[in-house]
Amino acid sequence: MGKKNEEVRSKNEEEVTAADVAAADVVYDLSSLFEMKFRDPLNGQVVMVRRAFKPRGKLEFYCPEE
């Protein structure tokens, strides 16, 4: 049974590439979050993130004026 577990682990380790690791290491500044634009998958609108008025401490999406 241990042999089969080793085979599964070796298959999982092979799937991870250097590009995947490099993409996971990217860390963004929190202030840049409020400048980023995202596309809503439901209706295709461009949305941005802002702090919510209520409940405090939460974030919300909004459509910026163009």
Image (cartoon, rainbow, N blue to C red):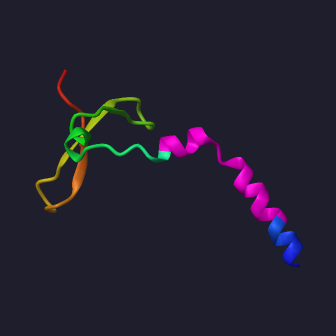
**Above or below, comparing residue 53 to residue 66 in the picture:** below
**Above or below, comparing residue 47 to residue 6 in the picture:** above
Q: Residue furthest front?
A: 18
Front-most of residues 64 and 5: 5
Q: Residue furthest left?
A: 53
**Above or below, comparing residue 35 to residue 53 in the picture:** above
Region in magenta: 7-23
From the viewer's perspective, tell me whether residue 26 is left or right of residue 47.
right
> Residue 57: x and y, percent?
17, 61
**In the image, what residue occupies the spot 84% across and 63% down?**
7
- The reply to whether the magenta stretch includes residue 10 is yes
**In the image, what residue occupies the spot 72% across and 57% down?**
12
> Residue 19: x and y, percent?
57, 38
From the viewer's perspective, tell me whether residue 55 is left or right of residue 42.
left
Counting labels gives 0
Q: Quadrant of residue 55?
A: bottom left
**In the image, what residue occupies the spot 44% across and 47% down?**
25
Front-most of residues 5 and 32: 5
